[in-house]
Image (tube, grey):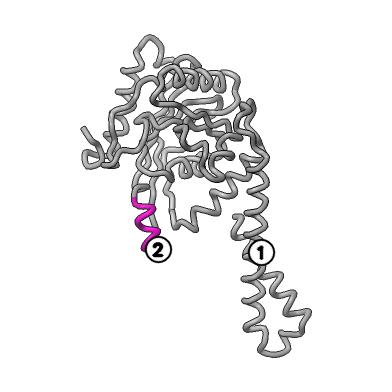
Amino acid sequence: MLLGTFAALSLIVGALVCLASGAFLNLSWLWLLPLTAVGSLLMLILLTFGFLMILCKRVDQDVPQEEDDRLYRVVTDLIIESVLPVLRIHVKKSGLEKMPKDGRFLLVCNHTDNSDPIILLYCLAKYQLAFISKRENRDMFVIGPMMHKLQCQLINRENDREALKTILTCIRILKEDKASVAVFPEGGIDDDLLLHRFRPGVFKIAQKANVPIVVCTLKNTKVVVKNLMKWKRSDVEMKVLEVIPAEELKGITTVDIADRCYRLMAEDLGPDLVAD
């Protein structure tokens, strides 16, 4: 939508310049119109980039983000919507009718590419997802500050005590109705890009917060970078498999919950995409 708006504005500017200069009275508009339109488009993109830099500069990641920032959420949605066509990513969504009609939830999904959070944010924009992410992402250009303003929580996978603090924060976010929490329970991307067994600790979030678990899968995101290098389109599929009600999470272990979610994903992905 954003790029489309920019393209339309650029054409309007080009047409106005041609009209003002009298280029439409001769054939000079054939070069002046596209030249002016392209120049205007580049200027709008540069202004947008500058605005984004200003927003990121204002973020102090050492100060806890207590609320979902509406401005940063809208900007993120607009940027993602514009970036996907540039990356030549086409997303097919299915199962969205299964999503909870109200209330917060814990979303779990398989993980094969760095574009996975972008795809999920695009498909589920209205649900205010706050991701649990590895702490290294804090220092990523633009991404780190924007994630912070969306209440994304960094987790130290090498320190159980620090990881517990992140889990407790996510429970509070859900209980206080601040956002829905999304996590990749494999804990990272493995070199083989297959589905691996889950770390069960994150499922404690749903139990303690008394919220349902949305189980979904992403397919074909692993080819995004390779296809982009060849300027090929990537057809990605996001599917909501099942929503496990909060009532069904009571009285069972997080290992049992992890196994149930794992089986659902493994069945949908198929044996070729599952490690064991």
Whether the residues at callouts 1 and 2 have beta carbons within 8 Å, the answer is no
Q: Amino acid at mark 2?
A: Trp
Image vertical order of residue 245 relative to residue 217, above or below: above
Q: Amino acid at mark 1?
A: Met
Q: Nearer the viewer, residue 103 or 144?
A: 144
Which residue is found at the position 46% from the left and 44% from the top?
119
Image vertical order of residue 53 relative to residue 86, above or below: above
- Segment tinted magenta in the rendering: 223-232
Disc nearest the viewer among 1 and 2? 1
Which quarter of the rendering shows the N terminus?
bottom right
User: Residue 169's x, y, as percent?
Assistant: 53, 20
Which quarter of the rendering shows the C terminus?
top left
Which residue is found at the position 60% from the left and 26% from the top?
178
Residue furthest to the bottom in view is 26
Image vertical order of residue 222 relative to residue 251, above or below: below
Which residue is found at the position 60% from the left and 29% from the top?
62
The residue that mark 2 highlights is 231
User: Residue 127's x, y, as percent?
Assistant: 55, 34
The residue that mark 1 highlights is 43
Mark 2 or mark 1, which is nearer the start of the sequence?
A: 1
Mark seen at residue 97: none
For mark 1, does the 10 Å Cα neighbourhood hold few (<14), some (14 to 19), or many (20 or more) residues? Answer: some
- Characterize the magenta stretch by its predominant secondary structure: helix
| Location of residue 25 (image quadrant) | bottom right
